[in-house]
Image (cartoon, rainbow, N blue to C red):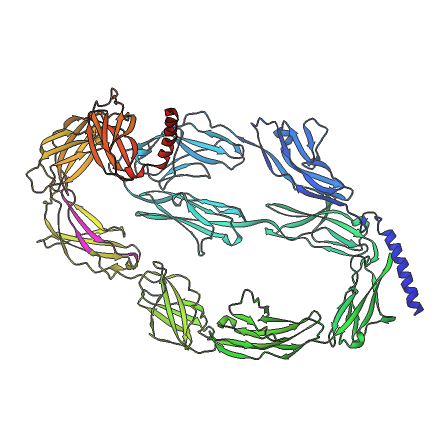
Amino acid sequence: MWLLVSHLVMVSFASCLAEFTWHRRYGHGVSEEDKGFGPIFEEQPINTIYPEESLEGKVSLNCRARASPFPVYKWRMNNGDVDLTSDRYSMVGGNLVINNPDKQKDAGIYYCLASNNYGMVRSTEATLSFGYLDPFPPEERPEVRVKEGKGMVLLCDPPYHFPDDLSYRWLLNEFPVFITMDKRRFVSQTNGNLYIANVEASDKGNYSCFVSSPSITKSVFSKFIPLIPIPERTTKPYPADIVVQFKDIYALMGQNVTLECFALGNPVPDIRWRKVLEPMPSTAEISTSGAVLKIFNIQLEDEGLYECEAENIRGKDKHQARIYVQAFPEWVEHINDTEVDIGSDLYWPCVATGKPIPTIRWLKNGYAYHKGELRLYDVTFENAGMYQCIAENTYGAIYANAELKILALAPTFEMNPMKKKILAAKGGRVIIECKPKAAPKPKFSWSKGTEWLVNSSRILIWEDGSLEINNITRNDGGIYTCFAENNRGKANSTGTLVITDPTRIILAPINADITVGENATMQCAASFDPALDLTFIWSFNGYVIDFTKENIHYQRNFMLDANGELLIRNAQLRHAGRYTCTAQTIVDNSSASADLVVRGPPGPPGGLRIEDVRATSVGLTWSRGSDNHSPISKYTIQTKTILSDDWKDAKTDPPIIEGNMEAARAVDLIPWMEYEFRVVATNTLGIGEPSIPSNRIKTDGAAPNVAPSDVGGGGGSNRELTITWAPLSREYHYGNNFGYIVAFKPFDGDEWKKVTVTNPDTGRYVHKDETMSPSTAFQVKVKAFNNKGDGPYSLIAVIYSAQDAPNEAPTDVGVKVLSSSEISVHWKHVVEKIVESYQIRYWAAHDKEAAAHRVQVTSQEYSARLENLLPDTQYFVEVGACNSAGCGPPSEVIETFTRKAPPSQPPRIISSVRSGSRYIITWDHVVALSNESSVTGYKVLYRPDGQHEGKLYSTHKHSIELPIPRDGEYVVEVRAHSDGGDGVVSQVKISGVSTLSSSLLGLLLPALAILVHLEF
């Protein structure tokens, strides 16, 4: 007993000694009271471009660090110190300001150093560059002549510049009229060139390349290039030719990547993009009429071969190039501020990923220290300081900064004393923690009461000081003390171990077997120490059940104490598995498990593969999925085409696929059609979930077997035979190079004339023959063809060639002027019977005849009204007879003038006075302007408020009397009338007898009161 007390006294004295040394620093080591820390960057310099033409006259590189005590800053450029005593440099906080920057002196790589008495750190490196964009050369650019229908490229040839990120546009004739990019015209943002797929007459003009540098906010434009299209009587089609091609590129993960592809051709080619053998990235976006593919936030999986295909009716062209996705360094594990015991070893992991793989180097207090993995052995105060781990590859570097502090402390339990009361269950196991603060690591010993404890079969003192006791008995209860000692002092801490009754499962759950939709009950009851609280925890396949989220299917029975019964409602297949009941107190727990079998429809088949693809059938194989405890009775194959989003049951061979089969053929498929397939299993409990769909495949091609429908035609222009049909939908093409063969012959003829129509989407062919008689009967038929052969002809239809256009002009054409904006035209019918309509052409004298307006009326009409004309304007009018072949010769041109415009000034209403049973409305006279028609009178519309129709009055006076309405409000509209039409409206509202407002009475009553007062 005396020896133990003496030991405790010595430990107490050592603790006091440790407390004395607690507050002092050991060189670069620290005590518990040390609150200082080394520099931590909050702002670091970034790459900066300074415009050479900038008027600002200075540039700043930022650097700011947090530290205690405050840090001191200095700067280095190209590994040499920046002379801060020079007038050209100044410091604002940690920021470096360069006055009057000079490209020869100041361009280079900069970094900042921040230090205090804990060490020094170095910022990331930043490059200071000087941006410029030279003007275009002053020489004139030669004109470019191109035949209409041919492709053309105008070269931009941008001037010298830095940086490279330019944007390009093209001016047409003058600033700021810019070319609008469309399917036919494209401006490359790679080289600035303007590409036109095929030149049209409307492209004539002067073009200038407009270049902008967003980095320095400057723009320049070239001398204008005259483009002169050379007219062609007929423009010849030519195949697609890709002239804007993207190259193999290396892209950084996370960047946006742009690929350009544009083709010349006539007609304008369609452009399609794909990723070869792989799906396109989900972030891909096609713009600029298909010429630009943008991939946003590109990832490593987006690497691959990309293809652009341009196609028109004359041919196609393809281009491929590869995108290699690289990655900037990124931390997998980096260093953090660390405290280690003096004399211990340290492995400081610093791991980064990237593409290519980054290399690792270290700085200590701003200077090169180590490369690769860092391990420190038997550390001393000299190892303390500011460390930086740098991971770098071709694309850049990332920095991780941390402070290493060396600890030297006597043991103390002040921050983490032993628990005063520890509970443990009889027969169980307990671990009593002992975690004092100490450096270096102390040695540990334990006592129970006055008895020293040593390792045995039941008792184990861990390396970290914790005490483990197994197979606990009642005798293990008592007071336990942990002693800790190192070369700087001693300390101890005490707690009491209390023994409780163990927790035991006394009613365990049992296995259950149910069908989908049924309920199941899992029983569970336990015995436990009455001084403790008991909780039941249920888990499913190792995961704790959340009864709040899963309350639809899982419920607990709280009716009985010490009972944790689980009710599973409306069980689904996903609820099958192992259920574990855990009875738990704060001291111990006990568990028991049971399995639940849920029978239901089969799971999805797996491993679906496509084999032996033919024109109308496909072989499929699959592997059995789970039968969910009920044998599979049959399988169903389902298909979906590229033309539909719906899955349909396929016809199969054999017609019924037994449940023990794992292969079958889908038959009666459409040739040359893209299909997806899936398989569904069925058992006595229902239809299961479908398999994962197969990859999309295309069946082999075959000759068409469907004839076009709705064959007919007729009409058209002189000497034409127009043949029409309903184009076959895509699913009936059955192969490549799909088109139509059109056959026709005179009704009584013997020989069929055949022509080929290669456009699969057209349903019309026009045959021209100058020797063809009008309204001649023809027999016509149409069939489809593809690269596999011809299909059947349609039924023969009888149509008629175009009739001749009328050759007689209408006579007795006359014009009646109605107003400033309307005239009426009348004529006498022509004698010919082939007239189907009449066309009136009219144009203003100041317009060209080619810009004439047209009005079409039926052949039964003798007149037409022309509206929306300009006032006081000379017009020319002519009339012609028309039919499906066109219009005949026009009548003589009739000249007419519209009247002057109606008065623009509205009548100003002077008064609206009630007189007996009538209202008297008075207004000012309207005087027409010199360019307006004279006023001939006034129109007054009297209508209920909210309605558009009412009673219309005409008068030459400046007033009108109107009956008072019985109820409601009425609107009176007054407008001037002239030969040119009606003028602008003025209006006033009046009230009915029964709706004389209370507000009006409110105005009258004070006036009456004044009159009464004056009377007296």
Query: Horizontal and vertical percent for residue 1013?
Result: 39, 26
Direction from residue 816 to residue 831 in the image, left or right:
left
Query: Horizontal and vertical percent for residue 457?
Result: 79, 76
Instruction: Answer whether residue 22 is magenta in the image.
Output: no
Tell me the quarter of the picture where residue 959 sits.
top left
Task: Name the residue: 30% across, 67% down.
Answer: 668
Q: Please state which of residues 109 and 118 is positioned toward the viewer in this rendering.
A: 118
> In this rendering, is residue 105 above or below 687?
above
Query: Does the image show residue 246?
Result: no
Q: What segment is highlighted magenta in the picture?
A: 710-730
Query: Horizontal and vertical percent for residue 29?
Result: 81, 49
Tell me the quarter of the picture where residue 420 sits.
bottom right
Direction from residue 388 to residue 963 in the image, left or right:
left
Instruction: Answer whether residue 725 is magenta in the image.
Output: yes
**Quick one: which residue is furthest to the top in this view?**
930
Tell me the quarter of the picture where residue 823 sits.
top left
Query: Horizontal and vertical percent for residue 652?
Result: 34, 71
> In this rendering, is residue 696 above or below 358?
below
